[in-house]
Amino acid sequence: MPDSQPPQPQPQQPSQPQPSFGATANATALLLRGARLTDGRVVDVRLSGGRIEAVGTAGSLIALGGCVDLDGYLLLPAPAEPHAHSDTALSAVAPDGPVSYDPDDVQRRATEAALLQVGHGATTLRTHVRIGDAQELAPMGAVLQARRSLRGLGDLTVVAVPRLLTGVAGADGLAMLRDAVKMGAGVVGGCPDIDPDPTGYVEAVLAVAAEHGCPVDLHTDGGDPARLARLAAMAGGLRPGVAIGPCAGLSRLPGDAAGRAADQLAAAGVTVVCLPQGGCGGVEQQGVQRGVAPVRLLRAAGVRVAAGGGAVRDVANPVGRGDPLEAAYLLASQGELRATEAYETVSTAAREAMRLPEVRVEAGFPAELLAVRGERLEGVLSLAYSRIVIHRGRVVARTNAVREYCDSAVAVALDLPRQGRQGRPESAP
């Protein structure tokens, strides 16, 4: 099963009259007309019942319900967000002192942050939530409530993150971790680097995950090769799977040590979730240097590498956007990956890390899609302004960006493309 499977949202009502030619209207159907695919084809895509029903050449499919004109848009499998922090999101500037962990405040921030990320195109999110300390399970309860309020817009899965799990001090954390899973956390997580016994911490997490049949997602800087080797050895036999991140410390290791660690992680089937947009509170609180995991080295060794957003405007990254396309852009612009490979880290690889079904723009696949204005993936990653987000076969978010310039003889002479309303009076930009 994937991380979470909330109830099916209410179907979208048709936005156009019933089709002619004797076709029967379908309230769950949506036709995406004239979309460009990454292979250059321009197609019509019909969605029904939350899945892609048919893909045909442009103009070949009949609208059985609503219709969206995607002329000028590139249609992609929707990205997924494998590493969010909803409980601390949007808390970088606390107006009245420290960050509030009042459940109502946490729920509001978590909901707003999730909507921002859905608007970017991430229709499924996995968020790490701290448990324990003075707040105990209250923040997780608030994020679970936010998850319920987001049904139909996007899917949200909670990773329970206890502070300590070993020794006398860790006994309460271990009991609380089990309670968190019973309460609704779909993934067992944690930060072994901050426990006095990191190996014991990982053993405890893996035991709880095996007991409840949950995936594992751990925070680690990855800068200790021996610790990574032990983690890989312990995690190798666990299914449904183990993810670790952000692993920026791997990039600071000597090449041979990093290569050995990558081989061990690949052999164990461990996924690495890097954070190209910056760090997160799970490791930043230790004063660890920022950076990005060595993506190219890891992929060459056979490690599945996904890219996440990390912090969204909290103290770990006050300007964090949580935008999957920015994460892909950064990996491509820094020379780690080609544009297609970079997008795979936030789409295909991210979905695999989260145990979600594969998405392709082909009949039979889930209708989790993102349309971005542009013709090629490189241009989309460079200028990803206008977006249409489709979740479970219906449009759940739109972003429309229009840039206008004053009238220019140069633009007219060169016949450059223009956006905006015709007939507007000339005005300064």
Image (cartoon, rainbow, N blue to C red):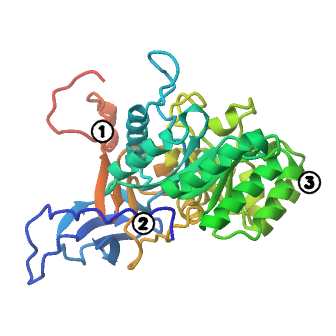
The earlier-in-sequence mark between 2 and 3 is 2
Q: Which residue is mark 2?
A: 37
Q: Is residue 10 above or below residue 201?
A: below
SS for callout 1: loop
Residue kind at label 1, given as amino acid type: Val
Q: Can residue 261 be spotted in the picture?
A: yes
Which residue was labeled with disc 1?
402
Q: Residue shown at 58%/66% (left/top)?
A: 352
Dots 2 and 1: beta carbons under 8 Å? no
Q: Residue 21 vs residue 270: left or right?
A: left
Q: Residue at x 61, y 31 (%)?
A: 316
Q: Which mark is residue 256?
A: 3
Mark 1 vs mark 3, foreground winner is: 3
Residue 405, x across and y down, in percent: 30, 30
194 left or right of 46 in image: right
Q: Nearer the viewer, residue 427 or 270?
A: 270
Q: Gap in Å between the C-alphas at discs 2 and 1? A: 23 Å
- Estimate the spatial distance between the alpha carbons at disc 2 and disc 3, rounded to whole Å: 40 Å
Residue 120 coordinates in the image, percent (x, y) = 42, 47
Amino acid at dot 2: Leu
> Residue at position x 35%, y 60% from top?
391
> Mark 1 or mark 3: which comes first in sequence?
3
In percent of width and height, residue 269 lies at 73, 67
CA distance for labels 1 and 3: 49 Å
Q: Is residue 339 visible?
A: no
Q: What count of labels does the image hold?
A: 3
Work out which quarter of the rendered image holds the C terminus and state it.
top left
Say what secondary structure mark 3 lies in: helix
Circle 3: residue type: Asp
- Are there few (<14), some (14-19), or many (20+) residues within 10 Å of tag 2? some
Which is more N-terminal, label 1 or label 2?
2
